[in-house]
Amino acid sequence: MALEPTPAASPSTTATDNPATRKAALRQRIRAARRLTPASTRDLTSNLLQLLDQLTDGVPTTVACYLAARSEPQTRSFITRAQAAGHRVLLPQVRGDGGLDWADAAGAGARDSGFGVPEADAVALPEGALRQASVIVVPALAASSTGARLGQGGGFYDRTLADRALTAPVVAAVFDDEVIADLPIEAHDRPTDWIVTERRIIATVSPTPIQ
């Protein structure tokens, strides 16, 4: 599957739109749609691996990736195959203060985080571990070709991405019908460099090169 260029941006929303209100409505609609379509029928693994290979030139590196909840684009197969290709994979752990710690996927299990998403069942790495990642795969409810990402609303990844290496591309994993033009954004939202769906790989803003 060839990588697709960034589509032309559509007209921006009007100043009277309330981003928080629009986000809440989108979250409700997308969550309802996800409950109707089993995530297992829309596998992103092949495209995630293809993009990872391109971004790293096939050289093993450190990759950070979320552990998917049942309705989200699944990542366990991607994690296993990335490890088999020699990559070190970091998995998140949710902190009580709304941030994320990271643990090595090697030997880690999965457990309920208490926030509705799985997390790594392993010893957390020292603070700043995310800066070791050369590629970061994040969950999303929707994403746009301009780099906007709609999360679940907890802000975990927006806060965490502030601590990443600036050269690490951020990849949003969504289903194809969740690529939405003119996605509402707020000042705290962190942009993404790539979108991966079960059908496409989309460059948003100019992808951040691996150094």
Image (cartoon, grey):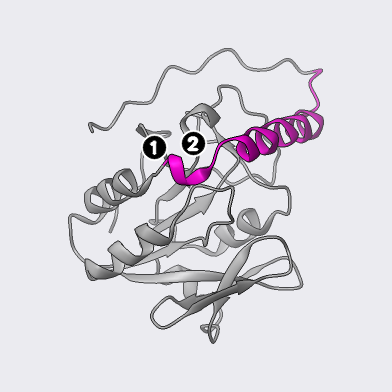
Judged from the image, the secondary structure of the residue bearing numbered disc 1 is: loop
Q: Nearer the viewer, residue 112 or 98?
A: 112
Query: Which portion, as a residue range, is magenta?
Result: 16-42
Residue tagged 2: 175
Instruction: Say if the magenta span includes residue 58.
Output: no
Q: Is residue 132 above or below residue 116?
A: below
In the image, what residue occupies the spot 25% across and 47% down?
50
- Which one is nearer the viewer's eye here, 29 or 56? 29
- Please name the residue shown 36% across and 32% down the image: 199
Asked which secondary structure carries label 2, the reply is: loop
Q: In this rendering, would 164 be left or right of 13?
A: left
Please state, as top left, top right, bottom left or bottom right, where the N terminus lies in the image.
top left
Residue named by callout 1: 198
Specify the amino acid type for callout 2.
Answer: Phe
Structural crowding at the residue carrying mark 2, measured as other residues with C-alpha within 10 Å and reported as few (<14), some (14–19) or many (≥20) = many
Image location (x, y in percent) of residue 71: 59, 47
Quadrant of the drawing holding the C terminus:
bottom left
Q: Is residue 204 left or right of residue 97?
A: left
Q: Position of residue 147 (x, y in %)?
A: 51, 35
Report the residue at 18% width, 63% height from top: 59
